[in-house]
Amino acid sequence: RKEVEQDPGPFNVPEGATVAFNCTYSNSASQSFFWYRQDCRKEPKLLMSVYSSGNEDGRFTAQLNRASQYISLLIRDSKLSDSATYLCVDRDSGYALNFGKGTSLLVTP
Amino acid sequence: DAGVIQSPRHEVTEMGQEVTLRCKPISGHDYLFWYRQTMMRGLELLIYFNNNVPIDDSGMPEDRFSAKMPNASFSTLKIQPSEPRDSAVYFCASSLGGNQPQHFGDGTRLSIL
């Protein structure tokens, strides 16, 4: 099984802080990359795709380094509602998603 | 619009019993995926279908597991006989096209005693 590795955390940060998550993937043939968010006892939901040039969606910035097989997610100005588990995901030429085990984030008042 | 609908939401049964999990994908979606989530192994693909045809079942753990998709609006995942190590949350997801975002159902929380 091709691995996606993440630091499980938990990351405890105060509101307004900037926090960064990283992950590495072992499948050099991976073609697509994503960050999913999963709240406690809920289903995973797509947060954003990750593109080679890097991409931003509001307070969230994702980066991909294909040479190092490394993906990152930066969250600026953290909100209480950002508390969740963040799943790093890759996909090869097939259509099944390959999930990391997730990084837990807790944003505190 | 209705999302992916899974049933039951929770299932508790004794080992050796047959378990059937059900999924209704979003109308019009042509891909359907079954995933399993445990603390130890995280989220793993079990099987996926395209236009009701199984495409990749390499994640199905063993012969005790089987999945069917008799029509575009319904799929089942069966475990027979069930074992305690099958306890997990089972998610169904669907997408319109293989490259499009996958929408997940609420999951079935399965406990085998």
Image: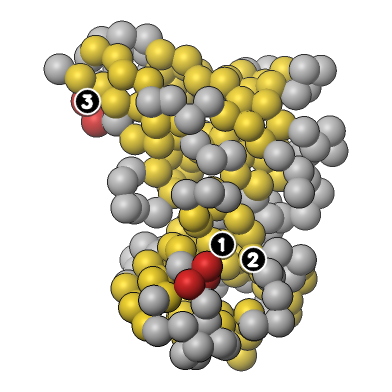
Q: Is residue B73 visible?
A: no
Say what secondary structure mark 1 lies in: strand
Q: Residue tagged by mark 1?
A: B35
* Position of B76 relative to B47 (above/below): below
Q: Position of residue B4 (x, y in %)?
A: 42, 68
Question: In the image shown, does A82 or B9 lie closer to the viewer?
Answer: B9
Task: Report crowding for label 1: few under 14, some 14 to 19, many 20 or more residues within 10 A (C-alpha).
Answer: many
Q: Chain of mark 3?
A: A
Q: Position of residue B22 (x, y in %)?
A: 46, 81
Cβ–Cβ under 8 Å for marks 2 and 1? yes
Work out which quarter of the rendered image holds the N terminus of chain B and state it.
bottom left
- Which kind of residue does numbered mark 1 sit on? Tyr
Q: Residue tagged by mark 3?
A: A80
Q: Residue tagged by mark 2?
A: B46
Work out which quarter of the rendered image holds the C terminus of chain B and state it.
bottom left
Q: Tell me which residue sits at (60%, 66%) in the image.
A: B33
Cβ–Cβ under 8 Å for marks 2 and 3? no
- Which kind of residue does numbered mark 3 sit on? Leu
Question: In the image shown, does B17 or B29 lie closer to the viewer?
Answer: B17
Q: Tell me which residue sits at (63%, 80%) in the image.
A: B65
Task: Report crowding for label 2: few under 14, some 14 to 19, many 20 or more residues within 10 A (C-alpha).
Answer: many
Mark closer to the observer (2, 3): 2
Work out how far the residue at label 3 is from the one at label 1, CA to CA, in angstroms.
29 Å
Left or right of B9? Residue B96 is right
- Which kind of residue does numbered mark 2 sit on? Leu
* Position of A50 relative to B103 (above/below): above
For the residues beneath circles 3 and 1, the answer to whether they share a chain is: no
N-terminal label among 2 and 1: 1
Q: Chain of mark 1?
A: B
Query: In the current view of this chain or complex, which residue is farthest to the right?
Result: A29
